[in-house]
Image (spheres, rainbow, N blue to C red):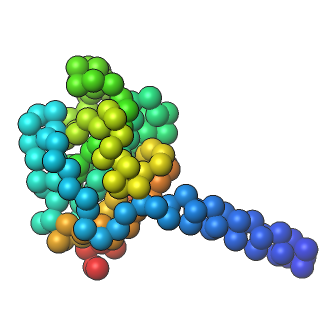
Amino acid sequence: MRKKDWAFYLFAALFIFAGQFLAHRDLVTGTPPSITQTTLNGEAALKNLGTRPGLIYFWAEWCGVCRSMQNSVTQVGKDHPLATVAIRSGDDAKLESYLREKKLTWPVVNDNGGDIGQRYGVKAVPALFFTDRSGDIVFATAGYTSEWGIRARLWLASWI
């Protein structure tokens, strides 16, 4: 590899890293902010978290990237505790209709005003928060994440 190529790739990697850092710097870690709202099914939002590594997933029905992640989140939710928060996705009836149409059985809190997302530092969806065995957030990321990426972070959370 030529010296000029090496410098370009180094600059590109630093640029991407800086962008990722700036995009994720406001996402909460540590003790998750409380979610007092119940899910659409009337359950406590974070009730399943804190026994083993789990996922808090912020999404929106209008988000194309979120739609591309639906199967991955569903599959991970079969093996790990899952809490989801729908941001600015309409009233409960609209959200329930969307969930039925897409055959999604996630526990969903409707954050139509975006207040919960603000407390978590969410500026864009999808946003994912990975919790450890005690329920604390140990990793947070925004944007597309593959099923393997989600599972890898959950595996790492089991060792923290």
Against 6, is 87 above or below? above
* Residue occupying image coordinates x 22% and y 39%: 109
**Residue at image coords 15%, 65%:** 50
As rendered, which of 38 and 115 lies closer to the eye? Answer: 115
Relative to 58, is 17 on the left or the right?
right
Q: Is residue 44 above or below residue 7?
A: above
Task: Quarter of the image for the C terminus: give it.
Answer: bottom left
| Residue 153 x/y as whole percent | 37, 66
When asked about the image quadrant of residue 159, the answer is bottom left
Residue 155 picture quarter: bottom left
Residue 69 image point, x, y percent = 41, 42
Numbered circles on residues, count? 0
Residue at image location 47% in from the left, 54% down from the top? 142
Can residue 154 be seen here? The reply is: no
Frontmost residue, 19 versus 70: 19
- Above or below, comparing residue 117 to residue 158 in the picture: above
| Residue plotted at (38% across, 58% down) | 150
Q: Position of residue 132 (x, y in %)?
A: 24, 70
Horizontal relation, residue 140 to residue 23: left or right: left
The quadrant holding residue 74 is top left
Quadrant that contains the N terminus: bottom right
| Residue 13 % position (x, y) | 70, 69
Task: Specify whether residue 102 is in view.
Answer: yes
